[in-house]
Amino acid sequence: MSELNALIVAGYGEADSYRRDLFEARIRATVRYADPAAWITATAVAIALAGAGELLAQWRHEIGMIAVSDLGPGSAMAEVELAGTKGYSSPLHYAASSPGTLAGVSCIAFGLRGPTLNLTMDPRDGLPVALTMCAGWLAGKAARFMVVATCRAAGSSTIMSQALLLAPPGFAGSGKPLTESETVWLAGVAPAGGVAA
């Protein structure tokens, strides 16, 4: 756990709805069939990256991402299933119904080209794995920065996503060491808004 405590939190993001205004029109068109869960996760990532303009400009292709969720793209999968029962489903919808869209939409939207992983499991169980992977990729210089995002149900019809932008130990920019409170918040155990940026 000591290598995790050395990680630096350089940005926070939280969303329970898709904020269209945070994405360029060409990005919205490219992934237009993406599931609401993927867009909500991308919104949380956009908020986490909001203060990292210089980092994005310089290191965009060396920022990786790990998404952790047991939700999957339920709406997009249901659309593909419904269309299939009617005899035709557009192949454009197939990619949108993949669980990988939780990480993929954010990577497409922000041009992230570092290592990427999608853990299809409850964030409470998957977060330790995700943070260990982030620490390893940062220590091994496979990535300069990592985004870790979770997505979960927050009530019967609400989806909540939280995201952190993580930097390696010794990061000279603004940020603070990763604490247990951030990991609890990211796992969705703490109430929404439980961690202030």
Image (cartoon, rainbow, N blue to C red):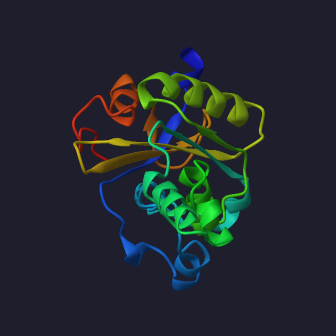
Q: Which quadrant would residue 66 be assigned to in this image?
A: top right
State the image coordinates of residue 149 (x, y, percent, origin top left): 48, 44
Give the vertical position of 116 relative to 119 (above or below): below
Tell me the residue at 55%/35% (across/down): 120
State the image coordinates of residue 88 (x, y, percent, origin top left): 61, 71
Q: Nearer the viewer, residue 76 or 19?
A: 76
State the image coordinates of residue 126 (x, y, percent, origin top left): 52, 27
Tell me the residue at 63%/46% (across/down): 145
State the image coordinates of residue 155 (x, y, percent, origin top left): 22, 42
Q: Which quadrant would residue 186 be assigned to in this image?
A: top left
Tell me the residue at 39%/31% (across/down): 187
Give the vertical position of 85 relative to 152 (above or below): below
Tell me the residue at 73%/59% (across/down): 61
Q: Nearer the viewer, residue 22 or 11?
A: 22
Q: Nearer the viewer, residue 175 or 130?
A: 130
Which residue reaches farthest top? 1
Q: Which quadrant would residue 96 be assigned to in this image?
A: bottom right
